[in-house]
Amino acid sequence: MANVLAYGREPKYKTMKIIYRAANIVEAHILSGLLQSRGVDAYVGGQYLQGGIGELAALDSATLSVEDIDEEAAKAVLAEYERGDLSTIRESGADD
């Protein structure tokens, strides 16, 4: 089975790196969406492991991987996330 990214397409490059170990699968998917919104495709790994573990604590099972070419851009976005310094999107007409 081919490696398919979160949005169902084949990666451009076959080499990917784990760049983040999320606290849980929900955080991993939120960060994947954040990266996607910034133009970086991400792959969430370990999502099936957490279901198999059940109620036991699943340590380091939720990972986020990106293609090598996107590593620096992804790390910059994740650094913003960890600092709590993400820019907000202003809704149309909110302060007009």
Image: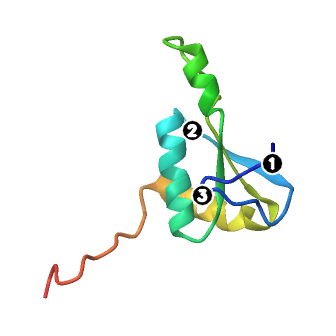
- Whether tag 2 and tag 1 are in contact, CB under 8 A, the answer is no
- Comes first in the chain, label 2 or label 1: 1
Kind of residue sitting beneath label 3? Tyr
- Where residue 62 sits: x, y (%)? 61, 34
Q: Which residue is mark 3?
A: 7
Q: Which residue is painted at 34% across and 73% down in the image?
A: 89
Identify which residue, 21 or 45, lies in the foreground: 45
| Residue 2, numbered circle | 1
Kind of residue sitting beneath label 2? Ala
Graded by Cα atoms within 10 Å as few (under 14), some (14 to 19) or many (20 or more), the crowding at tag 1 reads few
- Where residue 13 sits: x, y (%)? 84, 63
Q: Residue furthest bottom?
A: 96
Kind of residue sitting beneath label 1? Ala
Cα separation between marks 2 and 1:
24 Å
Q: Which residue is painted at 52% across and 32% down in the image?
A: 24
Q: Which residue is mark 2?
A: 22
Q: Is residue 14 above or below residue 51?
A: below
Give SS at disc 3: loop
- Comes first in the chain, label 2 or label 3: 3
Cα separation between marks 3 and 1:
13 Å
- Where residue 94 sits: x, y (%)? 16, 79
Cα separation between marks 2 and 3:
19 Å
Graded by Cα atoms within 10 Å as few (under 14), some (14 to 19) or many (20 or more), the crowding at tag 2 reads some
User: Where does the C terminus fall, quadrant-wise?
Assistant: bottom left
User: Where does the N terminus fall, quadrant-wise?
Assistant: top right
Give SS at disc 1: loop
Q: Would you identify the image quadrant in which residue 71 lies?
A: bottom right
